[in-house]
């Protein structure tokens, strides 16, 4: 049953969104060597939708998956991070369309910036200090959600060893 989420969803105005059951991405954070908190970003391959921009590893949600499952699976496929201990902290619906399509950002912590291995959907993966994310050419959807995500990161204490239940919030 894996892979049934691949495909476009269309709004009445023709806007299209990837993921027949919605989509999710992983906003993974860790302390950088200089003491700043960094997030893992993906430089999207030129051939991909909105190629050449920076965003989160993520993608289409399959019908049997939770947003957390999708975000972690996609981050593993696109960045090779599945074998690291990830502590999920928050799920936040950061985009919704008229058709009912949603994008959920899953915020998670790791103890150190994990090594990554880019697949064909990425030209580069990079740990970026949160204060420098705005300096990159961001994917339009990520750019719209980044101010709220940045505020959530600031309000959510970094905690790589757990910290209780994972709340879900909608915009």
Image (cartoon, rainbow, N blue to C red):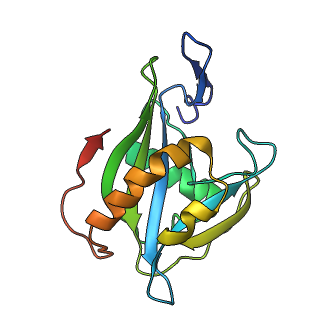
Q: Does residue 106 appear anywhere in the picture?
A: no
Q: Position of residue 6 (x, y in %)?
A: 61, 30
Q: Where is residue 168 in the image (x, y as percent from the top left)?
A: 26, 45
Residue 6 lies, with reference to residue 14, above or below; the image says below
Q: Residue extending furthest right?
A: 47
Please tell me which residue is depicted at 55% across the width and 70% down the height of the picture.
Answer: 132
Q: Residue extending furthest bottom?
A: 34
Q: Position of residue 140 (x, y in %)?
A: 60, 42
Q: In which quarter of the image is residue 13?
A: top right
Q: In which quarter of the image is residue 47?
A: top right
* Quarter that holds the C terminus: top left
Please tell me which residue is depicted at 24% across the width and 54% down the height of the picture.
Answer: 166
Residue 35 lies, with reference to residue 39, above or below; the image says below
Number of labelled discs? 0
Q: Does residue 97 appear anywhere in the picture?
A: yes
Q: Residue extending furthest top?
A: 12
Q: Position of residue 94 (x, y in %)?
A: 41, 41
Residue 9 lies, with reference to residue 143, above or below; the image says above
Q: Name the foreground residue: 115 vs 139.
A: 139
Would residue 102 be found to the left or right of residue 59 on screen? left
Please tell me which residue is depicted at 45% across the width and 29% down the height of the picture.
Answer: 63
Q: Name the foreground residue: 5 vs 9.
A: 9
């Amino acid at each position: 049953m894996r892979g049934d989420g691949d495909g476009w969803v269309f709004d009445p105005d023709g806007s299209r969104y990837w993921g027949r059951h919605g989509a999710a991405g992983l906003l993974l954070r860790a302390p950088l060597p200089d003491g700043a908190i960094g997030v893992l970003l993906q430089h999207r391959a030129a051939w991909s939708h909105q190629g050449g921009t920076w965003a989160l590893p993520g993608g289409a949600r399959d019908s049997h998956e939770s947003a957390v499952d999708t975000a972690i699976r996609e981050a593993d496929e696109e960045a090779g991070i599945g074998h690291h201990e990830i502590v999920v902290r928050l799920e936040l619906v950061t985009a919704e369309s008229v058709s009912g399509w949603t994008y959920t950002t899953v915020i998670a912590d790791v103890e150190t910036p994990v090594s990554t291995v880019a697949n064909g959907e990425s030209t580069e993966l990079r740990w970026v200090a949160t204060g420098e994310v705005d300096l990159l050419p961001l994917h339009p959807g990520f750019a719209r959600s980044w101010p709220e995500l940045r505020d959530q990161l600031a309000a959510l204490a970094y905690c790589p060893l757990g910290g209780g239940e994972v709340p879900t919030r909608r915009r």
